[in-house]
Amino acid sequence: MVIWKSLSETDIEVFNAINGEIKREDEGLELIPSENYVSKAVMQAMGSVLNNKYSEGYPGKRYYGGQEFTDIVETLAIERAKKLFNAEHVNVQPYSGSPANLAAYLAVMKPGDKLMGLALSQGGHLTHGHKVSQTGKLFKAVQYELDPETKTLDYDAIRKLAEKEKPQVIVSGYTAYPREIDFKEFAEIAKDVGAYSMADIAHIAGLIAGGAHPSPFPHMDIVTTTTHKTLRGPRGGMIMCKDDDRLHEKYHSDSKYNLAQLIDRSVFPGLQGGPHMNIIAGKAVAFEEDLQPEFKEYAAQVVKNAKALADALMEYGFELVSGGTDNHLILIDLTNKGITGMQAEKALDKAGITLNKNTVPFDPRPPFDPSGIRLGTPAITTRGMKESEMKEIASFMNEALENINNDSKLKEIKQKVKDLCSNYPLYELYKA
Ligand code: DSN
């Protein structure tokens, strides 16, 4: 068929860029805590002909014909997600985490209503009400902060703020918080002030699915997530919620829909058109992988590795925000090392170690060149690395950060990183 030629024959520029990325991922240490490597099976589902199909609506109730296979795929994704998280209702159509959050908010709030979330600079997310995000413009955002001493969640202060502000939605779940979250406590605070409780578990979804972090269910009313971080699926989003008419009566006495229906209607037709069925197929495949016993081992190892890496880094004098980690990520305040987050990110890039500069709570520096760096273990754990490799990685990082202006030293470290990674090859099949 005329369109069925290989990428290498039709577009050498894109082909070469993809090959460059394969080599970069294979030879370097990926420590960005929101990144991971998906399986070949997930990749195949994402790259399948389901990309070609429009499927507005939901299984069994579509607006276009030809849905016999898309209905199978979407139903599998929904049922597997329900099992994985013990969720009552699941919508697998959100394109990613930000649209999932917006859809969840618009299901239960009107513009001008009050949204309470952790400030971005403290470890929240743009969509938790930051002023430059639409979520901070459409809604009146109230931002809570961490305890200035411990840099951990202060549930008493959060309760006081919620009682004073009486928001419609209280969001927990973060992008740079290394400690466990007490979802039960958050749900009680929300209930007491008449708010919906919502958890954005994008970062820790895989840990929750694998039993390495307490679940937001049955406490939370609404749970949003991405599917590509610790969950190890395709780039995408998902919303889970209670399927409970009592919520509808309490908050929406003027509406004929319950919470699950409000969420579905908010995603489609409220915010999105046709769902990306190839991505939904990838979600179904990933959720089945996540239901296997090996995924529990993976989730436990992610946390063990993060703790081992944290301990080794502290031995080199790195200051970890909150003094350690309970999950997959580590936030380092580099102030005592006399370097900035941007300098560290750039030097480590030269050494083949990828992570991101990040603000630390109460950071006196600007977000583009903050005081900290954020790193994590989901991707390197997928490669098969364990505690002893974490010690090596900490020593590479320490050496690189002591030599940020010494390019030949950074090149030497890059070779050591490459040698370590060659013991844990990622893409042999692609090279063959
Ligand atoms: N970009 C994601 C992260 O790195 O945490 C959040 O959306």
Image (cartoon, rainbow, N blue to C red):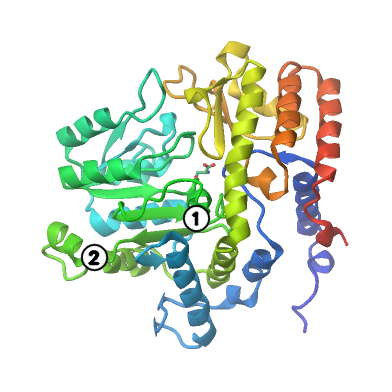
Q: Residue at x 49, y 19 (%)?
A: 365
Tell me which numbered mark, 1 or 2, is placed earlier along the sequence.
1
Q: Is residue 112 visible?
A: no
Q: What's the distance in space between the residues labelled 1 and 2, CA to CA? A: 23 Å
**Residue 110 on image: x %, y %:** 22, 53
Element class at badge 2: loop
**62 above or below 170?**
below
Say few, some or many: other residues with alpha carbon within 10 Å of mark 1 (under 14 / 14 to 19 / 20 or more).
many
Q: Is residue 350 visible?
A: yes
Between 378 and 300, the one lying in front of the other is: 300
Residue under numbered circle 1: 209
Residue under numbered circle 2: 244
Element class at badge 1: helix
Q: Residue at x 55, y 54 (%)?
A: 231
Q: Is residue 423 left or right of residue 128?
A: right
**Residue 378 on image: x %, y %:** 62, 45
**Residue 141 on image: x %, y %:** 27, 38
Q: Residue at x 37, y 60 (%)?
A: 240
Q: Is residue 24 left or right of residue 53?
A: right
- Which quadrant: the C terminus? bottom right
Query: Residue placed farthest to the left in the image?
Result: 253
Q: Nearer the viewer, mark 1 or mark 2?
A: 1
- Which quadrant: the N terminus? bottom right
**271 above or below 330?**
below
